[in-house]
Amino acid sequence: MRQPAILAVVWLCALLVLIGTLSKMPGQWHRRDFSNYYESAWALRYGIDPYSNNLTPIGTQLGLETNWLVHASETPPFLICFEPLTRLRPRVAFWIWTAINFSALATAMYLLLAYRRALSVRTALLLAALMLMSAPVNLNFYWAQSQLIILALMVVAMRAMDRNRDGTAGLMIAIAALLRAYPLLLVGYFIFRRKWRAVIFATAGIAAGGFATVAILGLPQTLSFVHGALWLTDYRVVGRVDNLSLGPFVSRMFWSLTGTAPGSSADWIRRSAIGAADIVVLGLTIRATLADRNRDDPYWRIYSLWIATAIMLTPVGWHHYLVLLAIPFVQMVASAAERRSSSRAIWMAVGAYLLSAISLRAFSRFMVPPPTEFQISFPLLAHALEETSFLALLTGYIATYWFATDHAHPVPAPQDAISVAQIDQNPRPLFGSIRTTSSG
């Protein structure tokens, strides 16, 4: 795929996909997630609680479509940061917000691909094209989401640790946690890797952000975020098949298999099952972290695993969260270029990438708005397709877990990444047969 002709075709496809997404965006300024951000921050600006009040009247006043997003769900620090955009007309604010997200993506791609010596120029260009044409990246722009900003913060944190600036890394994760909450789990990575400076800076950053939020909004308004969090865990949101994190998946399986209704007397069993599943995933991640004794975390195997774990364990996760898997997937390719990735991890990552595209297409074509004719005619197939979003996340987690734990079966390096001293050793293709070594 790194031959010039094939690389040109891949880039052409990536540009066509991106242009297709951008062509749909001019009509999106008054709807979807951007509408909810704008309405929520506008309400906060005028002293209206966006977490407990219905935002539909505000949306109507501003010419925005509220749809089912009738309450704020973002953290108070996020809405404070977004509030300056509400001083502009929604259409103008939308394009500024889009430019911010493009800048975040460009920053993340540059830091991911330009600072890894194991990646050849062609490989980096191929990965860049695959990122641009990926379903999660395009969905972030289509929905005017904020996960690209979180991606950039996580990549900056990784590169800061590359330079032994653990304090900066801790602050980046603190900012990400203040904006979206679920990146808070990455503080666990700092703790188990004994990066105490990062732990201190992350804790101090979160505390400072929390105090600043209370100082700006007041304690009652800050604590009202609990109402938004509870609304997001309501069964009507949890039951959506595009809600791909582990907890919602377990809930949907429980309701489907037991035939019970949400809120029934057996609901404690569902909650217990979610808790048990979360403990299993977190336990696997901690076990892999403790088993890896290399504190430097080469290729960021363990860091990548904690990112995938954060997506798995977030109470609410959508398809665009999968954009964060770009970090472990790029690290896998860089590791493979130096014969340090297992083939099964790479192939599972390929599966996750394809499933993310399939799940998005299947959902938009066959599942919206429910019940569709396809769901009525082919109920079993429809149920299978409904969970492909979770399968994309699950395969991504498994790929990252294998990447973190497989050290005995590296794949051979691609020819253009082999050093001069290795030229006479008959290098094999990237996805060729496995060569066993004793090194990790």
Image (cartoon, rainbow, N blue to C red):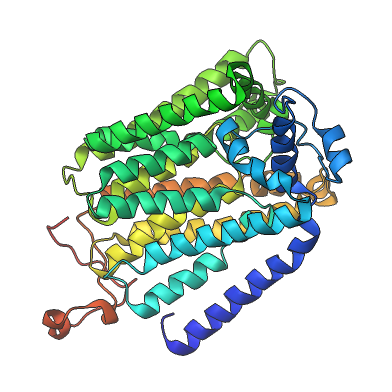
Residue 399 visible within the image: no
Quadrant housing the N terminus:
bottom left
Position of residue 171 in the picture relative to residue 33 (left or right): left
Residue at 75 percent of width and 38 percent of height: 39
| In the rendered image, the vertical position of residue 9 relative to residue 397, given as above or below | below
- Residue at x-position 76% and y-position 64%: 24
**Is residue 428 at least partly visible in the picture?**
yes
Horizontal side of residue 223 vs 378, given as left or right: left
Image quadrant where residue 79 sits: top right
Location of residue 71 in the rendering, given as x and y in whole percent from the top left corner: 73, 30
**In this view of the protein, which residue sits in the foreground, 186 or 107?**
107
Q: As displayed, is residue 241 above or below residue 239? A: below
List x then y, in percent, for residue 95: 69, 59
Quarter of the figure with the C terminus:
bottom left
Measured as percent of width and height from the top left, residue 301 is found at: 30, 50
Q: Nearer the viewer, residue 410 or 329?
A: 329
User: Eyeballing the image, is 164 above or below 13?
Assistant: above
Which residue is painted at 78% across and 49% down in the image? 31
Q: How many marks?
A: 0
Q: Residue furthest bottom?
A: 5
Q: Is residue 342 left or right of residue 88?
A: left
* Residue depicted at x 42% and y 86%: 3
On the image, the x and y values in percent for residue 243 come to 63, 40
The residue positioned farthest toward the top in the image shown? 265
Q: Nearer the viewer, residue 244 or 120?
A: 120
Indicate whether 239 appears above or below 414: above
